[in-house]
């Protein structure tokens, strides 16, 4: 029988996933004591590998239990390992520096190979340390120096700050500016994490961006990941990705072409920079931008401040809670952010003025700003010969097909459905984005009249359902 050694303060063995709850408690105890460790399922306490049956579902069960029962969230590596004798185990490698952690709402601490309940005094002391701004991630020294600053991003920031009148000293020397902004660590050489994040190309600012073919994360038409950059530079990349993805309406006013975006650009800019100002930078997760047919979502990793809801901030009178005081303070000077908790109100006001629906949503580990693409249908309905609706794809205007009148719509659909077509394909062909309106006002009447038939008659709600014109 293979033996892999002894349990330690950072290594825990469980005979099987039947001890999943106890395993999660061990993870938390080890995190609170050491910040990292390894857990094995399929190993006896003495280190003998006894193995267990492992399927993809088994791995998912372990992952889901960790996500659901450990707070703050962690993102471990979970995998299957098979030894020479053919026996398989699950191993979980984990780390975290946001102590204290709890499992099933109880904090524990590791002592030898035991997981004991942490006493209240130690728990509250850890909480004070975690919440102490001086100990926050942004105030810790980084490995970066002035020599690592992205000078293009630095100049962009400084020009904006001086133009806003919030930086009035004349020098444009990066060393002088970093000193004035109090972004040097105690050694006077290395930048604080805040300075590195703002002005250096680092990996903690990473973002994933994707466009999806429908309203769900099923089929994507484009996916990109930017692994490193400065907050100044990354925010511009994210902003441009959304601008290129959304639709624009072009009107000819007199002799001028006037373009109107389906989502106010200023609202997008506000949401993007806020996602960098308020994100958690040490949880191993990235920000995310998702472009769907009916909406565009900006995800901020770390979620909304605990105990608060976005609705509290929509009147602009709520006292701000700043997760990254130094980062948001620096962004205040360039007028990218304000310090009065008015960001959500500005986004809402801009969208209300434009007629664009916006939603603020809290998830377990993310805060989401969702801009709905409802203006496109209004534009289509009001379109006349002088107007065009365009999509800016990779910086190029692509003019959509002319709007189809209601009188011609039925025949266009029937001609289009000479071969089987999906609901999404039909909607796109006639330029209707509202799913409910399409189903009740257009699709159902054609089905009821027998002019259009389902290819799978006994399964009307099938995902594979298509529609074809009756002969």
Image (cartoon, rainbow, N blue to C red):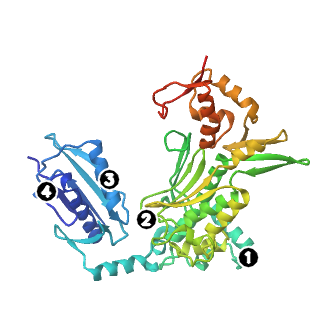
Q: CA distance from mark 2 to mark 1?
A: 33 Å
Reading the image, the residue beneath label 1 is: 165
Mark linked to residue 63? 3
Question: x, y percentage for residue 52?
Answer: 17, 45
Q: Which mark is residue 282?
A: 2
Count neighbours of disc 4 (C-alpha within 10 A) and say few if under 14, some if 14 to 19, many if 20 or more. Answer: few
Give the structural element (helix, strand or loop) at label 1.
loop
Q: Residues within 10 Å of mark 1 (few under 14, many from 20)?
A: few
Reading the chain from its start, which is encountered first: label 4 or label 1? 4
Please state if 171 lies on the left or on the right of 104 as rendered. right
Badges 2 and 4: C-beta atoms under 8 Å apart? no
Q: Nearer the viewer, mark 3 or mark 4?
A: 3
Give the position of the C terminus as an image quadrant: top right
How far is the residue under mark 3 from the one under mark 1?
50 Å
Dot in front, 2 or 4: 2
> Circles 3 and 4: CB distance less than 8 Å?
no
Can residue 213 be seen from the camera position used here?
yes
Looking at the image, which residue sits at the far top? 471
The local crowd at label 3, few if under 14, some if 14 to 19, many if 20 or more residues have their Cα within 10 Å, is some
């Amino acid at each position: 029988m293979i033996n892999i050694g002894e349990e330690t303060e950072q290594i825990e063995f469980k005979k099987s996933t039947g001890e999943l709850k106890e395993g999660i408690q061990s993870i938390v105890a080890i995190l609170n004591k050491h910040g990292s460790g390894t857990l094995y399922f399929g190993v006896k306490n003495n280190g003998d590998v006894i193995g267990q049956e492992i399927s993809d579902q088994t791995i998912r069960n372990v992952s889901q239990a960790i996500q659901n029962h450990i707070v703050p969230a962690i993102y471990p590596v979970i995998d299957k390992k098979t030894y020479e004798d053919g026996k398989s185990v699950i191993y979980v490698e984990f780390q975290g520096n946001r102590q204290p952690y709890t499992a099933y709402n109880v904090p524990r601490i590791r002592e030898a190979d035991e997981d004991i309940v942490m006493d209240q005094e130690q728990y509250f002391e850890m909480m004070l340390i975690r919440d102490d701004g001086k100990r926050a991630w942004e105030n810790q020294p980084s490995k970066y120096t002035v020599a690592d600053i992205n000078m293009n991003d630095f100049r962009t920031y400084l020009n904006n700050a001086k133009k806003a009148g919030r930086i009035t000293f004349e020098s444009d020397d990066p060393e002088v500016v970093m000193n004035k902004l109090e972004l040097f660590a105690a050694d006077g050489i290395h930048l604080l994490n805040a300075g590195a994040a703002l002005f250096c190309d680092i990996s903690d600012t990473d973002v994933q961006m994707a466009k999806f073919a429908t309203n769900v994360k099923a089929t994507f038409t484009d996916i990109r990941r930017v692994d490193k950059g400065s907050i100044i530079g990354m925010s511009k990349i994210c902003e441009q990705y959304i601008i290129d993805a959304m639709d624009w309406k072009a009107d000819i006013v007199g002799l001028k072409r006037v373009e109107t975006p389906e989502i106010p650009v200023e609202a997008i800019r506000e949401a993007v920079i806020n996602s960098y100002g308020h994100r958690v930078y040490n949880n191993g997760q990235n920000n995310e931008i998702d472009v769907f047919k009916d909406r565009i979502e900006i995800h901020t990793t770390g979620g909304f401040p605990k105990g608060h809801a976005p609705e509290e901030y929509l009147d602009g009178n709520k006292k701000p809670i700043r997760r990254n005081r130094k980062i948001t303070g620096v962004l205040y000077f360039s007028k990218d952010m304000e310090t009065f908790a008015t960001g959500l109100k500005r986004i809402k006001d801009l969208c209300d003025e434009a007629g664009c629906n916006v939603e603020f949503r809290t998830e377990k580990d993310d805060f989401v700003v969702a801009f709905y693409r409802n203006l496109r249908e209004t534009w289509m309905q009001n379109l006349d010969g002088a107007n065009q609706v365009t999509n800016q794809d990779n910086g190029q205007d692509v003019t959509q097909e002319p709007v189809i009148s209601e009188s011609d719509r039925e025949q266009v659909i029937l001609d289009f459905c000479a071969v089987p077509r999906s609901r999404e394909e039909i909607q796109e062909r006639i330029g209707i984005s509202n799913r409910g309106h399409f189903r009740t006002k257009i699709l159902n009447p054609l089905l009821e009249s027998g002019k259009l038939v389902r290819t799978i008659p006994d399964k009307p709600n099938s995902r594979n359902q298509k529609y074809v014109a009756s002969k």
